[in-house]
Image: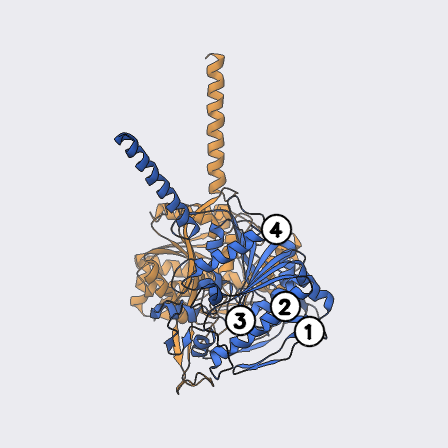
Chain colours: A blue, B orange
Amino acid sequence: MSSRNRSAASLLAAVAMLASTAAMADQNGSSEPLTIQEQGSFAVGGTVVETPGTYNNNNPTAEGQTFHGDHLSAFYQVPQNPKALPIVMLHGAYQSGRSWETTSDGREGFQTIFLRRGFPVYLIDQPRRGRAGNSTVAAALEPTPFDQLFFDQFRIGKWPNYFDNVQFDRKPETLNQFFRSVTPNTGPYDAGVISDAMAALFDKTGPGVLFSHSQAGGPGWLTATKSENVKAIVAFEPGSGFILPEGELPEEMPSAAGTLRPEAVPLADFEKLTRIPIIIYYGDNFPTEPTSERGQDNWRVRLAMAKLWVEAINKRGGDARLVHLPEVGIRGNTHFLMSDLNNLEIADQVSQFLAEKKLD
Amino acid sequence: MSSRNRSAASLLAAVAMLASTAAMADQNGSSEPLTIQEQGSFAVGGTVVETPGTYNNNNPTAEGQTFHGDHLSAFYQVPQNPKALPIVMLHGAYQSGRSWETTSDGREGFQTIFLRRGFPVYLIDQPRRGRAGNSTVAAALEPTPFDQLFFDQFRIGKWPNYFDNVQFDRKPETLNQFFRSVTPNTGPYDAGVISDAMAALFDKTGPGVLFSHSQAGGPGWLTATKSENVKAIVAFEPGSGFILPEGELPEEMPSAAGTLRPEAVPLADFEKLTRIPIIIYYGDNFPTEPTSERGQDNWRVRLAMAKLWVEAINKRGGDARLVHLPEVGIRGNTHFLMSDLNNLEIADQVSQFLAEKKLD
């Protein structure tokens, strides 16, 4: 090769490397700009409660007035040249759509990561939470000090110590942001109310993929029994609401953090879950045997119940898979897989699943 | 001109027209894509409350646990090639950052309109509201039927009739979305708590422009007394919290909807408001004389107080202006100027103000 050809070749190689780096940077959520075709928000679902009587404009009381509540609130973004199926992200307990935005240590969360990967993304505040705060049922809110319990229960460590391998940044400001992502229920938690609103959302969006986190596992399964537009579920550490056919419930599972009970639904509803691909991810630092460590033992039984649940789905011809991340070599994940330090690696796992199932 | 030259000229004219249409479409919030350099969310401000005692990981009670509350929650987007000063948008009573997103009839709100105009935009959920729900003070939430009162008080009309000229779409779904944008306080309303968190936000963002709506008027003025980074205030229908120097308070103003009282602050704080440009906008359908029409009379006194307030600012060398929109030929606006049918015309008014004051 002449020296001129060698120069041209190395220039080409450099350009290829730059192009590949740019593509990676984009894929990996760096500072490449995002092109948004459309964004906005709306409420969907819910009910209207009316107080009997006649409304008097100039002396208003409750009489004759209505109250709109129990809807969900959605914020959506559609990237340019979007993939066909949007992703709908439903948060867990004490959380809001905020769960999927910036991570506690300031990196991009799944909202922006999956937008970069070409999916329309819907972030939900479920009925009686966050911006969907209007509840048709009253509630008393108390400032309940749960920070240390959350640190333990969400498997960041055993307060005040972090797990050695934890995928959670240790700057104090990170923990501050994490604690401030908490927001309370503004009415009683009700999986039926949530899944009704979610089904109404899927009526509006059309076919899509549901991501659920933690407590949203249960309402997520119920949503798929109520709407045929749920084409797949990606469940991050589902914590409760494992629905199984009436008469086929496994035994309750006691743990140091309380007893986990499966929930009965008609067989016809359960069977709807066998028609879509489902994947469940759990992170690290689960005990293998019963232990008095409350924060961890809580998850031992949830993982065990999820395994039985996946077996039950597949026994009836379904397509469910449970990935316990340490078993595939991914270590140190907390309960918040989507915002852990390795959240891009988790996103890659999910992207691979979506590709396998031709959902992307 | 030869026929070829004429063709070329009309082609050029057509291209110029297309380019101009595209630019207009962009400016006017149509379907042109948005290029976002960065987006994300965080909490800022607030306090930490600690319960005395020792935390027991395996038998957790309140003892020794902390609670993070009274922060605000912010979602921000930075367009490509952003202007220097971001716009921070603070919602009013019963509302959240949702106020500035999609309008009730499904068009782009001020969030996206001002992004298209090149400003970084921060949407706030104030402390004890929406996604910033953790309040250090307890609250009892009741589903309070206020829809008809809101219809009247926010000057959509006199329930069940719309004002003839109202800039509010009359499809039932529009009213449904409007009512569902309501979300309750999760703790007592406290302008001091809100303005503390807002000042912490401006510490983080650096110099910026504050947009306030309705009840946020008061916390907005207070924020400017607490942070020198508030470089201007655009107040949409401020409803209360008119702060004036101690000893210089005008008389209380009774109305069919209750009595409006000015609020006293030290002169030194008031004088801080004379150092920045301030503009206040009010919409249409205000009564000129006292009336028993509660929904409208409420605004008669607020407009009157705002006029006194602007005079007081300017008397001390400040730069405040009040625009009562019907007086400049803009008719039919409700209390929600930023999402009315003519919200692009309102945005143009604001853009003109920002340009005049060299804030863009």
- x and y, in percent, of residue A339 in the image: 44, 63
Residue matched to label 2 = A311
Do the residues at discs 2 and 3 belong to one chain? yes
Image coordinates for residue A68, horizontal then vertical, percent: 63, 65
What amino acid type is highlighted by mark number 3?
Ala
Alpha-carbon neighbours of circle 3 within 10 Å: few (<14), some, or many (≥20)?
A: some
From the viewer's side, name the closer residue of A106 and B93: A106
x, y percent for residue A354: 55, 54
Residue closest to the far left: A3
- Which badge, 2 or 3, comes first in the chain's sequence? 3
Q: CA distance from mark 1 to mark 4?
A: 45 Å
Q: Is residue A109 visible?
A: no
Where does label 1 land, which residue?
A: A264
| Crowding at mark 2 (Cα within 10 Å: few <14, some 14-19, many 20+) | some
Callout 2: residue from which chain?
A
Q: Amino acid at mark 2?
A: Glu
Q: Residue at x 52, y 83 (%)?
A: A256
| Badge 4 vs badge 2, beta-carbon distance below 8 Å | no
Subunit that carries the residue with mark 4? B
Tag 2's secondary structure? Answer: helix
Tell which tag, 1 or 2, sits nearer the viewer: 2
| Residue B180: quadrant of the picture | bottom right
The answer to which of marks 1 and 2 sits earlier in the sequence is 1
Lower sequence index among marks 3 and 1: 3
Horizontal placement of A359 versus B234: left or right? right
